[in-house]
Amino acid sequence: MTEQGGQLGPVTFDRNGRKIKPFAVAPWAEEAFDPPLPPIIQVLRGDFFCLPFGGNAKAFRGEKHPVHGETANARWHFESLENRPDGACLHLSLQTKIRPGRVDKKILLIEGQNILYSQHLVSGMSGPMNLGHHAMLKFPDAPGSGILSTSHFLQGQVFPLAFESAEQGGYSCLKAGAEFDSLEAVPMSNGDKADLSRYPARGGYEDLVMLVSDDNVPFAWTAVAFPKERFVWFALKDPRVLRETIFWISNGGRHYPPWNGRHVHVMGLEEVTSFFHFGLAESAGKNTLSMKGIPTCLRLDPRKPLAVNYIMGVARIPAGFNRVVSIEAQAGNKAVVLNSASGRRTEASVDLDFLHRKDNL
């Protein structure tokens, strides 16, 4: 965990077996720059919490937040590292200044589970706020080595504006604003269709899409199966708190510093409540999703802290396991079964009740 920005990574799962390290760490993370890079970019890695989520180019009611908020840039305070009979819990805190309040970050590990439990407790704030997690995976070099899938989504859409500018050395290939209902057929600007369910792909481009999760389920999920490497990475969320999923597809499409064409085979799988990554002003105001009744921000109450709970984990998979088609609760919400399109399956111990906890850990 970085002190600056509270960014989590690298992380080793299955430490006594495969030693799986799925998260990306920016290739420039140990380089020095003059002038210095913004903290969020300098330490870019793994997963971090964004409050508010997005670029935040516009001020909102006098609040001018940095990219992805103070939580992704400011220096966190160490509270404790508690060793428990069944695991360990790291507790950090941040007193925010732009919108005064407090965020408590807790990362919980349970012995015998290949699971990260992440809770952010937001207290003392009032008013609308968009937020989210920003997990980033580094995919193996082989084309299509990872197979992506999600729980049922109501709507998919490519970022509605130009995501990159060729004049600045950035390139995108998906059709701006295009809507889709399958990851396997997403419109491209040249008239073709892209299959976003297989990655790495489309080298030399940078793109972003957003999916609206179905909130009529106990939990929503995102998964990436790596058949050759014989493991699956998955994330679980409460879609009433984190309503959308953003795919940031970063495969060498940025040729300006510090990216310089070297940020490749990375995908952000970001669980958010936000209007794409525009920021607070656009997410709190009218937009094409909010006008359909789809929330793109939450309303904070200083008398009622908001718990944002998020689970990430890995599981080994048998030969023949491919795209995840469902993740089902088992054993009284103490485990999940991941089913693949091929009929193969795997299980993982995980406490699903964590997703709905309102109290501090």
Image (cartoon, rainbow, N blue to C red):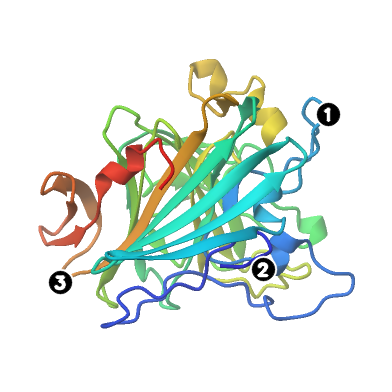
**Residue density around tag 2, few if under 14, some if 14–19, many if 20 or more, within 10 Å:** many
Q: Quick check: 116 left or right of 308?
A: left
Instruction: Give the residue type at disc 2.
Output: Val
Q: Residues within 10 Å of mark 3 (few under 14, many from 20)?
A: few
- Callout 1 crowding tier (Cα within 10 Å): few <14, some 14–19, many ≥20: few
Q: Distance between the residues labelled 2 and 1?
A: 28 Å
Q: Is residue 357 visible?
A: yes
- Secondary structure at badge 3 equals loop
Between label 3 and label 1, give the one nearer the viewer: 1
Compare marks 2 and 1 and give the one earlier in the sequence.
2
Q: Report the Cα–Cα distance between label 3 and label 2.
A: 35 Å
Residue 174 can be seen, yes or no? no
Rendered location of residue 164, percent (x, y)? 70, 52
- Residue occupying the point 36% across, 71% down: 145
User: What's the mark number on residue 43?
Assistant: 2
Q: Which amino acid does label 3 sit on?
A: Pro
Q: In which quarter of the image is residue 242?
A: top left
The answer to whether marks 3 and 2 mark residues whose Cβ atoms lie closer than 8 Å is: no
Type of amino acid under label 1: Gly
- Which of 22 and 5 lies nearest the eye of the viewer? 5
Q: Where is residue 40 in the image (x, y as percent from the top left)?
A: 70, 60
Question: Label 1: which residue?
Answer: 62
User: Relative to residue 16, is residue 63 depicted above or below?
Assistant: above
Please determine whether, in this image, residue 2 is positioned above or below residue 191. below
Residue 318 circle label: 3
